[in-house]
Amino acid sequence: MKTALITGATAGIGQATARTLAANGWRVIGTGRRQERIDALGQELGADRFLGLVFDVRDAEARNAALDGLPDDWSDIDLLVNNAGLAAGLDAAQEADLADWHTMVDTNVVALLGLTRRLLPGLIERKGAIVNIGSVAGSYIYPGGAVYAGSKAFVNHFTLALRADLHGTGVRATSIEPGMVETEFTTVRTGSQDKSDEFYAGAHPMTAEDIAETIRWVAELPAHLNVNRLEIMPVTQDFAGFRVARDS
């Protein structure tokens, strides 16, 4: 039985991925900040399928302590899903809160790097796989998303760079880059459930389960196959967005 470690498993894509992998024969180590959600997911999936770790991915000391404390029979990780991430704020760069920028970089980039580096030796030993959750924002820019888009562009390209460095090791690395997915993401970003509902209304967005199934498919491909990048959007969304500012 293979073991996956999923960050941000208390909601959205991470939670759906934990459920999907567990239902397909995986054991899942799920991380998150909210103890009550980790406990609930553990009760739902069962102790033989799920092990919860409660820490903030930005806290390297807590992360390392949690990993050091893994039971021996859970310590061999075959799949790392770097899912934890967020967007904070919608203001233009010249008006944005610098603290929001630091939060996004520390969560989306620095934490991902630290965990990946920590687990790489074991993943190489087991010829495992890494799935990083990037975003279409890393390729297609929108107003108010400068640092979020920049952080996801880093994730997208870091994954490709991992592929280059891991050449010959047997480790697979994939950047999954979703477009519009209805989760808590927009509620967190805007601080309003009403704004989130308005944003997704009538758009037929993707679901967390859609992305979770995509992650499962990538993770369970034959060992000789690697999906480098996978960009996925709902049919209702596209990437055309050029604007022109005209003289009045």
Image (cartoon, rainbow, N blue to C red):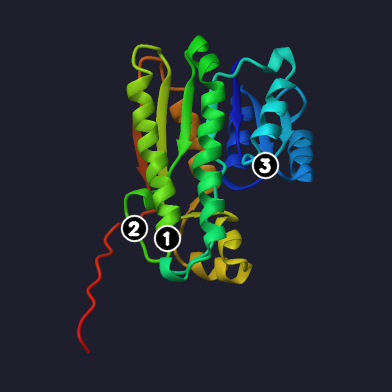
x%, y% of residue 23?
63, 29
Instruction: Identify the amino acid type marked 2.
Output: Ile
Rendering quarter of residue 218: top left
- Disc 1 to disc 2, C-alpha distance: 7 Å
Within 10 angstroms of label 2, few (less than 14), some, or many (20 or more) residues? some
User: What numbered label is drawn on residue 106?
Assistant: none
Q: Residue 145's mark?
A: 1
The N terminus is located in which quarter?
A: top right
Q: Amino acid at mark 3?
A: Asp
Disc 1 residue crowd, few under 14, some 14–19, many 20+, Cα 10 Å: many
Q: Which residue is denoted by mark 2 in the rendering?
A: 141
Instruction: State if disc 2 and disc 1 touch (CB < 8 Å).
Output: yes
Disc 1 residue type? Gly
The secondary element bearing badge 2 is classed as: loop
Q: Secondary structure at mark 1?
A: loop
Residue 245 figure quarter: bottom left
Q: Along the polypeptide, which appears first: circle 3 or circle 1?
A: 3
Q: Is residue 27 above or below residue 204?
A: above
Out of 98 and 9, give the one closest to the viewer: 98
Tell whether 34 sits left or right of 60: right
Q: Residue at x 71, y 34 (%)?
A: 62
Viewed as shown, does residue 38 lie left or right of 163?
right
Of residue 86 and residue 39, the one placed in the foreground of this image is 86
Q: Residue at x 24, y 66 (%)?
A: 242
- Residue 150: percent from left, percent from top: 39, 50
- Using the rendered image of the protein, determine whether residue 233 is visible from the camera's viewpoint: no
Cα distance in 3D space between marks 3 and 1: 23 Å
